[in-house]
Image (tube, rainbow, N blue to C red):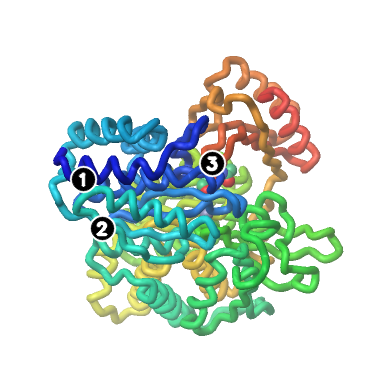
Amino acid sequence: MAADQQLALFQTASAFPLPPGVKFSYGTAGFRADASILASTVFRVGILASLRSLKTQSVIGLMITASHNQVSDNGVKISDPSGGMMTQEWEPFADALANASDPDDLFKLINQFVINNNIPFGRGQYAEVLLGRDTRPSGKALLEAAKQGVNAVIGAIAVDMGILTTPQLHWMVRCRNKGLKASESDYFAQLSDAFGCLMDLRSQTIETNRTDSKVIVDGANGVGGKKLEELKQGVKGLEIEVRNSGKGEGILNAGVGADFVQKEKLFPGGFGESDSGTRCASLDGDADRLVYFCVLKGNSKKVDLVDGDKILSLFAIFIKEQMSLLEEKKEKIKLGIVQTAYANGASTDFLKQMDLEVVLTPTGVKYLHEKAAEYDIGIYFEANGHGTILFSENFLHWLETRNAEVSHTSAGFEAQKAALRLLAVSKLINQAVGDALSGLLLVEVILLYLGWSIERWNELYQDLPSRQIKVSVADRMAITTTNAETLVVTPPCLQEAINSEVAKHSRGRSFVRPSGTENVVRVYAEASTQQAADCLAQSVAEHVK
Ligand code: NG1
Ligand code: ZN
C-alpha cells in the first residue's frame, strides 16, 4: 500500500475510535445500534463502500437508516452496483472491519483483504459512493463519518444525495450503473409516468364496486411521508392524503408506521374511528415497507390488516392475468413467488391454489431478492410489507420486441395491451429493492383496474390467527436454524419441544429464530384461533428462555 494512502487511513481512523465493549454484526439489514455508538462503524463502512466500488469498478450506495427502529437508533447498509444488497461474500469482512480494535488492526485487515481480493487500493483509481440518509437527527453527523471513511481511500469520492428513502438510494445506484438518468426528479417522473401509463391501459368497461376514491397514508413521521408529498404532485387520477408526514411534531416510528400497524394490528397515531370506510396505508421509517389497513369502528383502535402477503397476492393476480392475455410464449414464462416463514399460512395456501410456484427463503430481502431474480417474473414479499416484482432482462427484451409488431386481431390487441402493462409495471415497481412508494402506486392502480375496494381485496382469503413475540436471552446466536428457518438445529431438543407444542393445536405452526436487527429471539405461532396462536407462542417462548 502506498505511503500516502497508509497515512490517510491512519489519520482519519484515529478520529473514530471503536466504542468499548460492543460487537457489531452486519445483520439482516446492515449494522444497527444506538446512534451514539455508531460513528466508528459508519466511518468503516465508508471505507468498505469505497473498496467495493474499486473492486466492482461501479458506483456503490451507502444508506444511513435504522428503518422501523426507534428514533434514537441508527444504522448503515450498502447497496451493490445492481441496486441490491451488498453481496453476502463481503459480510464477514464488514463484521471484521466494524470490530477492528484500533487503526493498526483496521489497517492490517484492509491490507490483507485488498491483497486477497486483488483490489486496486491506494493506486489512485476512481471510486464513487452515493450517500443517503433518512430523517433521524443523528443522520447528519453519521453522514459526515461516512464521507470521511469514503474519502480515506485515495481516489474515492463521496456524493451526498441528501435525505432519501432507502429505495430511492438503491434505485439511483442501479440507474447510475446502467447509464440511466438517476436524479430524484427522474425517480419521481418515472414512477408517475408509469402510473399514468397503467391508468390509461385500464379497461374502461370494468364494473366497479368502489366507493372510496382516496387513500390516506401514514408516513411514520419519517422520510416516506415527505417524499410522498412530492411524488403525489405528479400523480394524476388518485387522491392521496399524507398524515404523519414528518413535518409536524410527531416522533419517527413512535406509535406510527408499517411495523407498528403490522405487529400491533392497531391504527397509527393521527388516525381515528372517523377514518373507517377509507382505504389506509402505512409506510415504515425509511419507506421500504408498505401495509394497508381498514380502521374498525368501536373496536379500541383495532384494524383489519392488509399485509405484505395480501399485497403479494394482489400483484400475483394481476401479473397472472396479464400473462394469460399474452397470446404467445405464455406457457414458457416462468413466474415465481417468494415468501418467508413469516408469511401467513393462508396466503401460501391461496397462492398455491392459484397454481403458482411458491418458495420460502430465510428472512431478509437479500435472500428473497436473490431467489426472485431466478424467474422471468419473480414476486417477493415479506409479511411486514417489504417486497417488489423483478423482471428478467431477457423477458423485458422479449416484451419490447413483441410490442414493435402491430396486431390486427382483437386477441392480439389485448395481448399488446397486456405486454404494455407488464412493461409499465417494470418501470413503476422498483427493480432494486422493495419500495413503499412505488408499491403504493401499483396497488392503487391494480385496485382501480380490477374495480376492487379494499374490503374486496381483503376477502381474497382470511389470515390464520398469528402471534409474534420477542424473547430476550443471554445469547440469541445459540439458536441456529435450517429449512428457511422453519426448523431449529441447535440447541438440541428445542425443535422437539416446539413440535410437541404445535401438535396440541389445530392448524398449529411455530418457529423461532434470532433476529438480525435486534438483540432478541423472535417466536412466531399460527393456529386456528387467536387464543390458540397466543397460547402456542407463549409456550414455545418458555422453551426458548
Ligand atoms: P429481523 O430482526 O432479522 O427479524 C426484521 C424483519 C425482516 C426485515 C428486517 C430488515 C420481521 C419478522 N423481521 O428482521 O423481515 O424486514 O427487519 O428491516 O419482520
Ligand atoms: Zn425499512
Label 1, label 2: how far apart the Cα atoms are: 15 Å
> Is label 2 in a helix, a strand or a loop?
strand
Q: Quadrant of residue 475?
A: top right
Q: Residue at x 44, y 44 (%)?
A: 30
Residue 545 screen position, x and y as percent: 69, 24
Q: Earlier in the sequence, mark 1 or mark 2?
A: 1
Three-letter residue code for mark 3? Thr
Residue 389 - label: none
Residue position for label 3: 517
Number of numbered discs = 3
Q: Is mark 1 within 8 Å of ligand 1?
A: no
- Would residue 142 be visible to someone looking at this image? yes
Three-letter residue code for mark 1? Lys
Residue 365 screen position, x and y as percent: 45, 47
Q: Residue at x 49, y 81 (%)?
A: 235
Q: Residue at x 72, y 45 (%)?
A: 465
Residue position for label 1: 55
Q: Is mark 3 within 8 Å of ligand 1?
A: yes
Residue 157 - label: 2
- Indicate whether 351 appears above or below 212: above
